[in-house]
Image (spheres, rainbow, N blue to C red):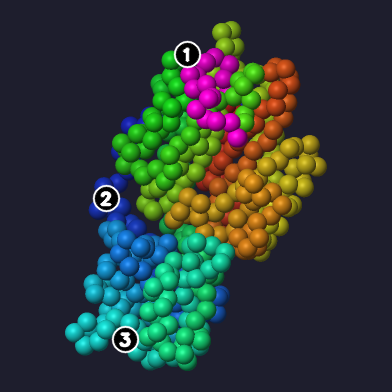
Amino acid sequence: MTRRTYAPLEAYRHKILPLRQQNDIRNGWLQQRLETVLPEVMARAGLDMWLVIAREYNEDPVIMSLLPQPAMSARRRTILVFARRADGGIDRLTISRYGIPGFYESGWNPEREGQYECLARTIREYDPQSIGINTSQVTAFADGLSHTEAENLIGALGAEYAERLVSAEAVAVGWLERRIAPEMSVYPSIVEIGHAIIARAFSGYVITPNITTTHDVIWWMRQTMHDIGLSAWFHPTCELQAPGEPFNALQDKDSMRTVIQPGDLLHCDMGFYYLGLATDQQQHAYVLRRGETDAPEGLKAVLKQGNALQDIVNANLTVGRTGNEVLKASLAQGREAGIAPHIYCHPLGYHGHAAGPTIGLWDQQDGVPGAGDYPVYDDTAYSNELNVTAPVAEWDDQIVRIALEEDILLTGGRVYWLDGRQEAFHII
């Protein structure tokens, strides 16, 4: 099976844009999203108004996706008001000390009235029948309104309008998960950078058997992301399996061997942010023994099972199904195919473990109440994350775990790999 080759990492370093240009691109995306995505998700949820309220350093999870760059926090108290008009358009206001010109109309004069006094007056003027606030029992992405700010809001509104407050969960999740055409066109090249980093990490450039440790590989990936201008959203991992050393999720990591040796099966997990979008990838490498030219056929057979399960998940990821329905169908079809499946896919976007339908958790294979009941929508991205286990004859029938994670896009009702997937081991 052909192994993909990538350009030297130096080439990708030159593709990372200067911060100012990154800001301009992201702000252009934000303007388009506010004008197209927001009206759609508010209409779909039936909300007349959406309030996003946060204080500096206690930011609501969704607010940073609504603020133009180079914002790094909410300033003092930032209040955003989205009011749906009769024509379907959205009035966008900020009731905050600092204006956000070009994106939000400033609606507060601090010299004339208090901030919540202004918000209450604005709401009375619009007279919305439903007012969405970010409170949710299901997802953190729609649960960013703090207790204090909720008390302030209810106190300012009074009983009549406070009774109209409802959860904005559907709007917050819909806003975060939806990808627009420019984001979708750029996403593959971002994911390609991740693949290139893994390919270099799992090579003789980084690994010298019997000298290099898994910790060395981890820190090389982390440092490389930093050096070329990417922000890791979690600390990478690297671990090994070998004859007599099976995978054990509950094993004390400090007791595991870390020096990489010939015959080892390596696994890594890494992800980063670029242009506000996250990647999340897991791949494997095999370290050749003397006289070997490829990985054992038994290991390659397990990888092929993993690829088959990926295809099953992609086929079941259809618009309108819930995450739990995708999980149930995929597990059943995997078992019918003779695979020992374990599926825990998740949405991908402005966060690594992003807003949208949860498709299994590693410790919840019977479905995930709430988060797994959310439906799949078009123009959304995911990490196809799973593992398979099977005995390998060359390892005396020891059970080997192949854990794969590759990033996908659902658009036009079809699933696409954002930058392909691993179908052959990296060979060291």
Element type at mark 3: helix
**x 27%, y 67%: residue:** 75
Left or right? Give the position of 68 relative to 403: left
Q: Amino acid at mark 2?
A: Leu
**x 65%, y 56%: residue:** 368
Q: Amino acid at mark 3?
A: Glu
User: Which residue bears the numbered disc 1?
Assistant: 210
Element type at mark 2: helix
Q: Magenta part of the protein: which range? A: 249-267
- Against 355, residue 46 (above or below) is below
> Looking at the image, do the residues carrying marks 1 and 3 touch, with CB atoms under 8 Å apart?
no
Between the C-alphas of marks 2 and 3, the distance is 38 Å
Identify the image quadrant of residue 272: top left
Could you say which is closer to the camera, residue 218 or residue 333? 218
Left or right? Give the position of 117 relative to 352: left
Residue 117, numbered label: 3
